[in-house]
Amino acid sequence: VDAVSIFGVSIHRVTMRQAVAKCMEWIDSPLGSTCRYVVTPNVNHVVLLRKHQGLRAAYQQASLVVADGWPLVTTSQLAGDPLPERVAGSDLIPQIFSAGEKRGGVRAFLLGAESGVAAEATKRVMANWPSTNVVGNYSPPLGFEHCDQENQRIVEMVNRAQPDLLVVGLGAPKQETWLHNHFRQLEAKVAVAAGGTIDFLAG
Ligand code: UDP
């Protein structure tokens, strides 16, 4: 995919429609290929990327990089190399559910947010998209990322559920570095580092 460089960050020149189509293509591909992941930069990520080597490494392995925030889209336009539109994670996830409804529903796993919130999001998603199946949700405890055993447990939990879509809402840069460290082990078709999307889905 064609990309635009903004403050040294390479962002894919895609519309929401194209981003959804890409994710659906990966969801339709057979299990066995590596789990692809999507990152959703905003200005805060651009700042973090300067000092955080782990986040830069995570960005390098991402299959899709979309502009979550308006300021990045506006900056690209002012620089004369425009991104077509904003593709926010909190929009992308519902759009994938909607696209999935037309073909029997997507199997989703929600990783992150507080446990009551993740449970509420699970209920609401299944009420709003009747063919969508939330096959698991988990809210990792504070500091989980430093514990190998806990990380392994999460990978196993996801792999038992075999989701089409893994929504990772752990905040930046944790969600991106977690995905970068584990995507090769994950039996999910596509994962999205989606910030506060699980909170958003919970209403
Ligand atoms: N979060 C989490 N575990 C953590 C830190 C954060 O599950 O250790 C969740 C938090 O509950 C919220 C999301 O991550 O649902 C962070 O959302 P935010 O919009 O702040 O994301 P960011 O802008 O940092 O990517």
Image (tube, rainbow, N blue to C red):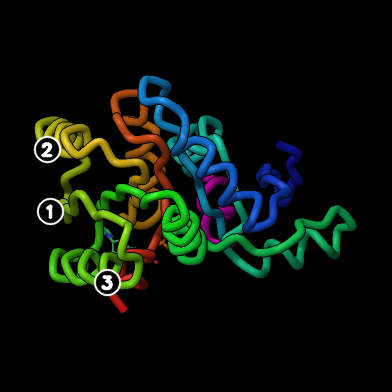
Q: Quadrant of the N terminus?
A: top right
Q: What is the CA distance from the residue labelled 3 to the residue labelled 2?
A: 31 Å
- Residue with the mark numbered 3: 127
Q: Quadrant of the C terminus?
A: bottom left
The mark nearer the N terminus, 2 or 1, is 1
Kindly state the secondary structure of the residue where label 3 is placed: helix
Give the percent coordinates (x, y) of residue 30. Answer: 41, 25
Magenta residues (range) = 43-51
- Position of 147 relative to 142 (above/below): above
Kindly state the secondary structure of the residue where label 2 is placed: helix
For disc 1, the neighbor class at 10 Å (few under 14, some 14 to 19, many from 20) is few
Taking 1 as reference, is 98 left or right? Answer: left
The reply to whether callout 3 and callout 2 are in contact (CB within 8 Å) is no
Residue 48 is covered by the magenta coloring: yes
Q: What is the CA distance from the residue labelled 3 to the residue labelled 1?
A: 27 Å
- Residue with the mark numbered 2: 150
For disc 2, the neighbor class at 10 Å (few under 14, some 14 to 19, many from 20) is some
The reply to whether callout 2 and callout 1 are in contact (CB within 8 Å) is yes
Q: Which one is in front, 73 or 203? A: 203
Q: Which one is in front, 56 or 159? A: 159
Viewer-nearest of discs 3 and 1:
3
The mark nearer the N terminus, 3 or 1, is 3
- Residue with the mark numbered 1: 141
Q: Quadrant of residue 3?
A: top right
The residue lying at 38 percent from left, 39 percent from top is: 177
Residue 63 is covered by the magenta coloring: no
Question: Type of residue at label 3?
Answer: Ala
Kindly state the secondary structure of the residue where label 1 is placed: loop
The residue lying at 26 percent from left, 54 percent from top is: 133
